Image (tube, coloured by chain):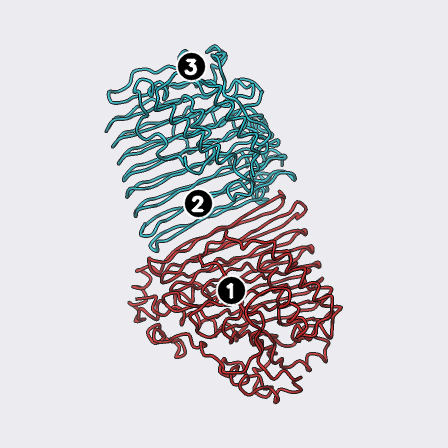
Chain colours: A cyan, B red
Amino acid sequence: MSNPTITEEYRAHFTDLQPDEPEALRLFRKAGLKTFGKLGLPASSREEWRYNKLTALRDRAFRPANGSPAEPSPEQIADLLLPEMETQRLVFIDGRHSPTLSRIGELPPGATVTNLTGHIAALGELPAGLNSLADHEHDPFTNLNSMFLGDGLYLDLAAGVAIEQPIHLLFLSSGDEYLASPRNLINAAEGSRAVIIESYASLNDSAAFTNVITEVDCAPGADIVHYKLQRENGATQHIGQSLVRQAENSRYKSVEIVFGGDMTRRFLKLDLLGENAECEVNALYLARGEQVHDLRTRITHAVPNCATRELYKGIVDEKAHGIFDGLVYVARDAQVTDAHQTNRNLLLSQDARVNSMPRLEIYADDVKCSHGSTTGQLEEEQIFYLRSRGLAPDAARALLTFAFAGEIIDTIELAPLRQRLSSELLRRLPQGELIEETL
Amino acid sequence: MKNDDKTINDLASQEYKWGFVTDIDSDTVPPGLNEDVIKYISTKKNEPEWLLEFRLKAYRHWLTLKQPDWQKVDFEPIDFQAISYYSAPKQQKKVGSMEEIDPKLVETYDKLGIPLIEQQRLAGVAVDAVFDSVSVATTMKDNLAKIGIIFMPFSEAVQEHPELIKRYMGSVVPYTDNFFAALNSAVFTDGSFVYIPKGVQSPMDLSTYFRINAENTGQFERTLIVADEGASVSYLEGCTAPQRDENQLHAAIVELCAERDAKIKYSTVQNWYPGDKDGVGGIYNFVTKRGLCNGENSRISWTQVETGSAITWKYPSCVLKGDNSVGEFYSVALTNNLQQADTGSKMIHLGRNTSSTIISKGISAGRADQTYRGLVRVARNAAGARNFTQCDSMLLGDRCGAHTFPYIESRHPGARLEHEATTTRIGDDQIFYCNQRGINTEDAVSMIVNGFCREVFRELPMEFAVEAQKLLSVSLEGSVG
């Protein structure tokens, strides 16, 4: 059972909040409070929390930031702002929108890019689609997010609208045990197109808890590319969920890069509800120290003729723990489904551990479904090959590790972002400097 | 095509051939479970005090447990008070020789293709025949005893070799292991006990044939096989039950223990009554099977062909404790009509350089649901551990399901674990290719299914391989067309 006092503490934090906001949002929060109060934190006996014990979250309740956040100057966070790229940018600090750091340029007609709660205030009611994909009945973290609902992206694309510049969402935590509850809502109408970069970072080394939900609704023919970068400090607890619904002929591509956090749980739920929809989901997690990286996907093929490509790769070193749990569900009559799921793990240290649970649940016969999982270390033959070409053993290992991770980085379609992450990967890998010399 | 390869069409008219009931007087305790029933079983079997204690401890532990519900099968909750826990054919006088066995029993086993009379025995196979709660005959026992092999009913072994039973019973599957293991430990009635002494290679295959006959009973047998240093044995298990409208519970425990350099090969053809085409009746097969590779270089291999049972729920496992030990699991599981199976294997790597292989072939037809669930765990000290897992599913028809849920846990960087799984059906192009070469559709399906399972079939002992292929064709009846 979860600790009831933690639930009580969150309830107390909730009562402290007296925001001036539309009635609809107040009721929304209250509903979240009620359900969270009932559910509490998930019991670790629950199958989906079996390997990730959420130790730090059971210790104490984090509180939402109050007062106005201490904003860094743009120079201080220059690098985090992706200066090399033209972007539409929204910056959030501890779950609250920072208008001074954000910059939304010219948008095509029919496109709305704004702060979600601002949009709710203007509208006076909740926007369509809010909580329509998140599991607000059973998931405690969804309700915790709802009750403390913070700022986030509201993106609405009318039919046929395409935003050329990527939309960069930068979520910063200023620490001090703050709970940030960002919420993003993306409605992409027929044939619309956008690229979203959802990125998380810390301004200092203090502990924080980020509990974020992103809901994406892709209408027929919509095309959404979604990058998620988790680079928070090693003291941060991060629970992030992306919930996606795809109609016919739509395409959704997700690339998750998880470097940071003390405990990071990333959950991707994808429902393919229209024929000929396609999704490609990739992830790279690099866990060191005592980090826990827990990646979970649920992909449902509800109708025929859809395709899934899933590739999740992990590098787990020192005392870290990597978890992959992926389910591909093919519903009755979802014929001609083409789904492939792969999880590969490099286990680099004696004290590290990996759990891998690739799953297929299939109720249709005319399908091409497969999955694979490997866990181990680098192939001796490959090391030998590089050594025979004159590389020192360490350099050979480093290079192969880099190549292992590079397969995911290479699926990033935005060249500047790809280069940035590639060099960041080099910095983060053990013996990255050796690779730089070799390259 | 060879003549003995029956076509699906011929087989479509066949039903479960083993569904008859033997009309024999039985000693059956009234349904219900309490300490008195356990004491009754224990007294009936003239058991020593320590065994009764073991049973009661298990029973008291069982009372604290809840029936697990994580498995992916649906069934009405079992009423454990509605089951009779002991049923034995009368005529329980000590049987001196095979000729004194009740002719009705001999006839039953003849009908099942298991001749008990020694002259007619299958060449080179020793059989222990278990009928409901008791072992009714064990063939070849004396010949085996000459080379030191102990092969006898469990209850006899309790009397004659208590020191071995005490030492090994519960050492691989303790009564605290799970709900059904606790139940079995409390009420188990009979089963087979095998002990192969140091350095002895069993000259023939040993086998047990399990038969449920009585109504409202459950079968709770226990098999314990111990291969001492350097010994080896191949063991076969078969099972059938009458055709009935109510479900019957089979909750067995199989424990294997292989010491240094020992080898145990355990093969099963499981053909319990699967229920009719609407899912009425059938056996619930909830079995705990586990092997312990206790010594260095030991090897345990599970091979199974599962076509029967309304619900199958079991995970034959290997605990690879000895360095360089090897665990293997080869399985073909076929579910048709409304059968459900949640089955797979567990490989626990504890020792260094241990290796394991899991090959699982699932065929799902009709409205059946089949799940592969497996665990491969590498402990912190299992340097050089190696696992290869392959799970392939074949779906025949669009109303069935096939699922793959592996759990892979690694705590050692030197371990290499690979898992792969595919799900397919028989392609129209494959059938077309066969048709084009003059092979009709029924034969083509049979051929493709057999090809799909070949990797497992070739691991089976010869007698079983032939039987398994036929069984597979029978069980496929009505699923193609």
Asked if badges 2 and 3 are on one and the same chain, I answer yes
The lab-note entry on whether marks 1 and 2 share a chain reads no
**Mark in front: 1 vs 2:** 1
> Residue A319: image x %, image y %?
63, 35
Residue A240 rendering spot, x and y as whole percentages: 46, 31
Q: Residues within 10 Å of mark 3 (few under 14, many from 20)?
A: some
- Say above or below: B384 vs B286: above
What x and y, as percent, mark residue B228?
72, 66
Q: Secondary structure at mark 2?
A: strand
Between the residue at mark 1 and the residue at mark 3, the CA separation in whole angstroms equals 62 Å
Q: Are marks 2 and 3 in contact (CB under 8 Å)?
A: no
Graded by Cα atoms within 10 Å as few (under 14), some (14 to 19) or many (20 or more), the crowding at tag 1 reads many
Q: Give the residue type at disc 3.
A: Ser
10 Å crowding of disc 2: few (<14), some (14-19), many (20+): many
What amino acid does circle 2 point to? Leu
Where is mark 3, residue-wise? A98
Tell me if A254 is positioned left or right of B38 in this view.
Answer: left
Residue under circle 1? B285
Which residue is depicted at the point 74% across and 68% down?
A: B49
Q: Residue at x 34, y 16 (%)?
A: A104
Decide: is B206 above or below A115.
Answer: below
The relative height of residue B382 versus residue B294 in the rendered view (above or below) is above
Q: Quadrant of residue B9?
A: bottom left
Q: Which residue is mark 2?
A: A327
- Residues B47 and B428: in front is B47
Q: Chain of mark 2?
A: A
Foreground residue among A175 and B79: B79
Question: Element type at marker 3?
Answer: loop
Determine whether label 1 and label 3 are within 8 Å by CB: no
